[in-house]
Image (cartoon, rainbow, N blue to C red):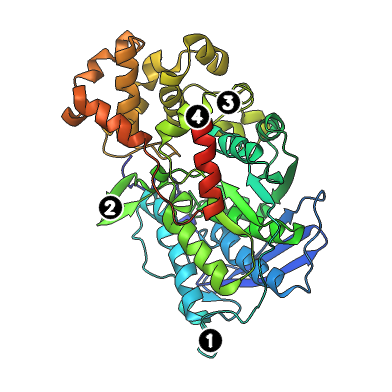
Amino acid sequence: MSNSKAISAADNQRPQHQCFEFVSHQLEGHALRLHYRLTGGPDADQSFCELLSLPETLPAPNPADPLIQALLRACLFSFGVSYFKAALPKNILGPAISSDEADFWNLLYSEGMGEFYYRNGLPIPDTVGFEALVDRSLPSHTLLSAHRSNHERALVLIGGGKDSALVAEIVRESGIEAEALSLGNSPWMECSAHASQLKLHRIGRQIDPALLALNANGAWNGHIPISALIAALSSLISHAAGFSDILVGNERGADDANTVWEGREINHQWSKSSLFEKQFQNWCSNHAPGAPRYASLLRPLSEIRIAAQFSKCKNQLSAFTSCNRNFRINADERPARWCGKCAKCTFVALILAPHLSDTEQLAIFGQEILAHHDNEPHLQALLGLSAVKPWDCVGTAKECWLSLLQLHRQGRLPASLNPLVSLAPNDLTGLGFDQAWAEEWHIHPSPLLSAPWQTRLHAYLNAH
């Protein structure tokens, strides 16, 4: 897809506000309200209130806790991207922050929104105005003296797909006390958590209807770094509940860009990347010390290794789906399990196929996704034969080539796809292919993951 303004309506229908204000956060028991306002310019002022329903199955955060206050501010700033993008105002108002905080939030609202800017045909700003909130008298590091609990207790973020399901399996076998958390009400999240015998806690999210109305009338709209929002909110919830670690399932391929535009990488998975994870860990260390450690347990692994390991989790094979249409807000728009017609379905079918029997594949997908003629454009884009990688959480072109070539070696590649084999990069065929497969299999070190969880990950892989 080109960087055309395909998402938004005519320019003259968009909000023309000049200022975005982070008004306040309001915590009452398990209800968290985040207040924002668009002001200035020819349009009438517009106020918003996002309502987040925290799990009532966990203790409510204590507003008197200074660390809770720091994490509440992180929620206020991170969830603000949904409302800021409607008008992209030039000025920002809000609570005072230090200069290094301004750098973090500018990064989230600029590079973290790279796909949004690209697909709307907009230049990516270096900053969006958080400098205006900087108070030079504030220290760059917070004065909080909280310490993370020595008692290990993990909170696994469940998304309903194979990656978080594998994390849940690794955590379950580690013997560490653990529970699960999800945003939304998809039944597949419950299925995945249940398969790993983890108690699931759910977060409810209610976007202000005023924003939905603006979107319907032509406001700027598009992809946001949703995992960054979940990172902030899960940190708040997990600290209140006494968890020491928040574990997610982002692999090393999440660093792979979809395209390069005007010299800048555009990455659909930016908020799942190692860059974001490192920046968020740094923010917590500096401004919320003692907060649970947020880290990806799968960061050292390629999608090939993840698929191979997940294929052995027989208890999970009937309990997951990775098709994003299953997680739409409107339940009536969700497929039974797989739509079978999108890039994500195509990728998951491709990456798992070398490690599953034909019978297992049919039981999971209910159809032969790779054999569908309509999915060939998705497959070509996944293989890097198109200008832009699919706008989805999918693996690298190399990982996709290696999986397709492995199927060909197994004699299991659909006949209609055999012509693609001749287009494979030279270094991925023959002996080079074997070497490349071994490289993708290799575990890369990850300084973002704590030493104990590095050890447990290796123990799990060695045992399976």
Q: Measured along the vertical axis of the image, is residue 303 above or below residue 351? A: below
**Sequence order check, earlier mark of 1 and 4:** 1
> Which residue in the protein does label 1 denote?
135
In the image, residue 201 sits, relative to residue 123, either above or below, namely: above
The image's mark for residue 261 is 2
Looking at the picture, how far across and down is residue 272, in whole percent? 48, 49
Give amino acid for label 4. Gln
* Image quadrant assignment for residue 233: bottom right
Q: Earlier in the sequence, mark 3 or mark 2?
A: 2
The amino acid type, in three-letter code, at marker 3 is Cys
In the image, taking residue 409 as reference, residue 335 lies left or right, namely right
Query: Which residue is under mark 3?
Result: 313
Camera-side mark, 2 or 1:
1
Q: Residue drawn at (34%, 44%), measured in percent from left and top? A: 258
Residue found at x 46% / y 58%: 276
Residues at circles 3 and 4 in contact by the CB criterion of under 8 Å: yes
Label 3 element class: loop
In this view, 246 is above or below 379 = below
Label 2: few (<14), some or many (≥20) within 10 Å?
few
Residue nearest the viewer, comparing 203 with 66: 66
Q: How far apart are labels 3 and 1 at the CA level? A: 51 Å
Residue at 51% x, 24% y: name it: 311
Relative horizontal placement of residue 388, taking residue 68 as reference (left or right): left
First-in-chain label (2 vs 4): 2
Q: Amino acid at mark 1?
A: Asp
User: Which residue in the protein does label 4 denote?
Assistant: 309
Q: Position of residue 56 (x, y in %)?
A: 82, 51
Check the image and name the residue furthest to the left: 426
Q: Position of residue 464 (x, y in %)?
A: 52, 28
What is the C-alpha distance between the residues marked 2 and 1?
34 Å
Q: Nearer the viewer, mark 1 or mark 4?
A: 4
- Label 2 sits on what residue type? Trp
